[in-house]
Image (cartoon, rainbow, N blue to C red):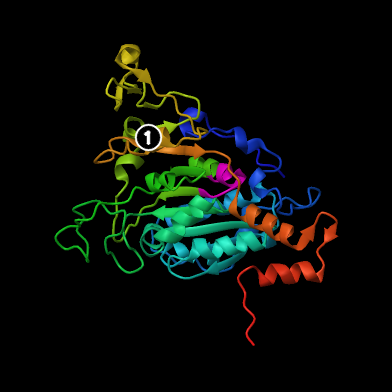
Amino acid sequence: MSLTTQPRSRRETGVDPSPLGMPLPHGLASVPRLDPDGPAPTRKDYASDQEVRWCPGCGDYIILNTVQAFLPALGLRKENIVFVSGIGCSSRFPYYLDTFGMHSIHGRAPAIATGLATARPDLSVWVVTGDGDALSIGGNHLIHALRRNVNLTILLFNNRIYGLTKGQYSPTSEQGKITKSSPVGSVDTPFNPVSLALGAEATFVARSLDNDRAHLGEILKAAAAHRGTALVEIYQNCPIFNDGAFDAIKDRDQQAARLVHLVHGEPVRIGAEPSRQVLVRVADGALRFVAEAEAAGAGEVVVHDAHADDPSQQFALSRLDGAGMTQVPMGIFRQVERPTYDDGVRAQIDAAVTTAGGPADDADLHALLAGKDTWTVE
């Protein structure tokens, strides 16, 4: 099987479809494939027999259904797919997939997944986490997985609240947010997960919405095709403790005026005709949206380059998020190639146990283990 698909236009999805037609995604190059002559898998093949238990209306249901529908397109054996989660509502995810999985420790899913991806190159390793799990207790584990560029895919569900522990403000809650732990409003400056990932030099960074299944499916395919750490932030509604947090960008009548669909190689635009605007860099270097007809005289038109080695412009795009979600970038911010941590570790191990002529002898192995800093005590 391949990742061929019939996506909507790039204008609608904000996703460059070029990686989706690859018969063997680079990120999955060492993972065993299904027999191409065997029966084609379906969504049901990846759904477990466990009752799905989230609150009615939770955005996690849509994400789960999207992932279950997307996994057959990878053409991988279920036994070679692993989902690792931390703690939180999102972290029940592994129970509902008929793959291998681990419901691990609070915030430590990226660390556990790093060990798994390094020891088992024959696995497709995924991390499912939330804004509290990943960005609070798990903050260091997340940024180090990103900077190391481990070959795994991280799905960060962002509902801007602690849901499992019943409604405390989270690292992504907006300033002034009134919750059970901030009864007169949060004074914290929230994280922007995309900005954080770009600052950590992540090689693949993207954002999508829980209720836009077509867009999310395309993002997931591109993330799976990437070799290295892919982080996908998914805006996800919590109907109990933060209902309506993303209504402004989910409303079909408002989306065109608020969503900035990032498409590699194309100008950064917002809105629809006749009021469509384009992003320009003005004389002082600031970025500003102007009417498309006036762009030529307003400054340098910004063309999105997801493949640029320097993430400065991609970071600047991540800062377009305006108060009240007046302009929200969606799609793939960054998609570059860099050596992966797990490939490097395995190469070191291979070099340590072999020589140019073949397997190392006992003397060489003893010298490696003893090292230079050892003492003999008599």
**Residue positioned 65% across, 41% down in the render:** 3
Amino acid carrying label 1: it is Leu
Structural crowding at the residue carrying mark 1, measured as other residues with C-alpha within 10 Å and reported as few (<14), some (14–19) or many (≥20): many
**Residue positioned 50% across, 64% down in the render:** 109
Residue 355 picture location, percent across and down:
80, 57
Residue 122 picture location, percent across and down:
70, 57
- Label 1: element kind: helix
Q: Which residue is mark 1?
A: 317
Residue 85 at least partly seen = no
Residue 374 picture location, percent across and down:
62, 74
Quarter occupied by the C terminus: bottom right
Relative vertical location of residue 144 with respect to residue 53 in this rendering, above or below = above
**Residues shaded magenta:** 220-230
Residue 228 belongs to the span the image colors magenta:
yes
Residues 280 and 155: in front is 280
- Number of marks: 1
Residue 8 picture location, percent across and down:
53, 32
Residues 248 and 190: in front is 190
Residues 14 and 133: in front is 133
**Residue positioned 74% across, 52% down in the render:** 33
Name of the residue lying farthest toward the bottom: 378
**Residue positioned 34% across, 47% down in the render:** 192
Classify residue 220 as left or right of residue 194. right
Residue 196 belongs to the span the image colors magenta:
no
Residue 38 at least partly seen = yes
Name of the residue lying farthest toward the front: 378
